[in-house]
Image (spheres, rainbow, N blue to C red):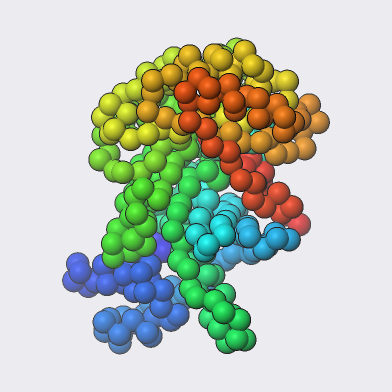
């Protein structure tokens, strides 16, 4: 859908029309503009003709059926990917992309291999969520029709962990978050929205002032600058200390708990010594560590074996650091962390 066209199309209409149009689409998930009965018939016809409710997305479903990857074709022919993760109990999370490609080129992440093509505007970000909202609604309708028990479960959580570095597209990401959070639009609770950054200190500080209850995650991946530089080129610009100082500032301002993501790569960042260093670095901070098993097929990198993850985890926990582990979704459809790279087939 060409959402950018909405504002232009409303040209001379009174200003409250935009809200009505957006509410009909994002909140009521109308099937056709003809169903938006609050709008004048002429406008409905115009919308139906100019911006029909259709999506340029292709989907692939994982074998287990709990994750669905969607490829969105943008107006300029470029593509981005988003992933729907269906947790047991009906909690639906959408992982959205914020850029086409990514300029950071972390060695473990396939998105970086495409390089950076462009930023997404806020409409292109929210359209990824809109698509999955319609998708879920349609799936529930179908299930009901064939007698399978299924109620419509809306999208409840958003993670900015798809393609791109959200803080290098800061303004559009903030706009998209406000859109998603808006009661008359998606109405997704701020606490159910998470932004993950590779760690850009000045943007972390800026984010502290946004007055939003959104979760912040930092891809730390190592407490050691040298190792970090080896796997994340952006670490050459920002040392760990600067990132931690920015996070301290963020916690001080927002009183919110920060998440540190830690991808576990065999013999690279998973030693006892690094776990101990991490305890020292994060001790006393309002935070937790999210361990992510490395996914991928880069022959130089291997995932940390289970026993090593357990040992690393226990060192952190014994040191007083809270730890969670990320559940792996969608490996078989290249939809897991770090696997988003659109290839035309
Ligand atoms: N640019 C942002 C968001 C995208 S990456 C960031 O760096 O945070 C989201 C998360 O996926 C990051 O924590 C990253 O460390 C993780 N990730 C990337 N590639 C991965 C891979 N191959 N295996 C496991 N996790 C990966």
Residue at the image point whose x is 29% and y is 43% from the top: 212
The answer to whether 99 is drawn above or below residue 22 in the figure is above
Say which residue appears at 42% left-offset and 30% top-offset.
287
Quadrant of the drawing holding the C terminus: bottom right
- Estimate the x, y position of residue 274 in percent, counting from the top left: 60, 16
The image position of residue 288, as x and y in percent, is: 46, 31
Up the image or down, 268 lies above or below 19; here it is above
Quarter of the image where one finds residue 297: top right
- Residue drawn at 46 percent across, 61 percent down: 155
- Residue 318 placement (x, y as % from top left): 53, 22
Quadrant in which residue 257 is drawn: top left
> In the image, residue 201 lies at what x, y percent?
40, 24
State whether residue 95 is above or below residue 42.
above
Q: Residue furthest right?
A: 299
Asked if one can make out residue 196 in the rendered structure from this viewpoint, the answer is yes
Residue in the picture at 41% in, 64% down: 3
Q: Left or right of 26: which side holds 128?
A: right
Q: Residue lying furthest front in this view?
A: 318
Q: Which quadrant of the frame does ligand 1 lie within?
A: top right
């Amino acid at each position: 859908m060409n959402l950018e066209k909405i504002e232009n199309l409303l040209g001379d209409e009174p200003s409250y029309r935009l809200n009505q149009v957006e509410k009909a689409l994002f909140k009521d998930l109308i099937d056709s503009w003809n169903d938006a009965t609050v709008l004048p018939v002429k406008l409905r016809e115009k919308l139906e003709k100019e911006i029909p409710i259709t999506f340029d997305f292709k989907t692939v479903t994982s074998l287990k059926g709990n994750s669905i990857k969607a490829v969105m074709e943008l107006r300029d022919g470029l593509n981005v990917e988003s992933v729907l993760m269906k947790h047991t109990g009906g909690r639906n999370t959408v992982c959205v992309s914020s850029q086409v490609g990514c300029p950071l080129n972390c060695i473990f992440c396939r998105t970086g291999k495409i390089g950076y093509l462009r930023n997404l505007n806020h409409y292109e970000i929210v359209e990824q969520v809109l698509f999955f909202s319609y998708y879920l609604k349609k799936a529930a309708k179908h299930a009901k029709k064939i007698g399978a028990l299924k109620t419509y479960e809306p999208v409840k959580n958003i993670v900015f962990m798809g393609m791109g570095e959200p803080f290098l597209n800061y303004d559009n990401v903030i706009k998209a978050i406000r859109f998603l959070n808006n009661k008359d639009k998606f109405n997704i609770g701020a606490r159910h929205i998470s932004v993950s950054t590779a760690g850009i200190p000045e943007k972390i500080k800026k984010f502290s002032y946004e007055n939003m209850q959104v979760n912040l995650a930092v891809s730390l991946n190592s407490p050691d600058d040298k190792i970090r530089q080896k796997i994340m080129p952006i670490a050459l610009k920002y040392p760990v200390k600067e990132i931690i100082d920015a996070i301290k500032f963020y916690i001080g301002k927002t009183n919110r708990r920060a998440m540190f993501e830690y991808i576990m790569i065999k013999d690279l960042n998973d030693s006892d010594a690094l776990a101990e260093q991490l305890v020292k670095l994060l001790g006393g901070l309002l935070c937790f560590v999210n361990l992510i098993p490395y996914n991928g097929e880069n022959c130089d990198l291997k995932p940390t074996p289970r026993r090593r993850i357990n040992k690393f985890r226990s060192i952190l926990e014994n040191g007083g650091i809270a730890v969670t582990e990320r559940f792996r979704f969608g490996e078989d459809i290249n939809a897991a962390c770090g696997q988003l790279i659109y290839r035309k087939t």
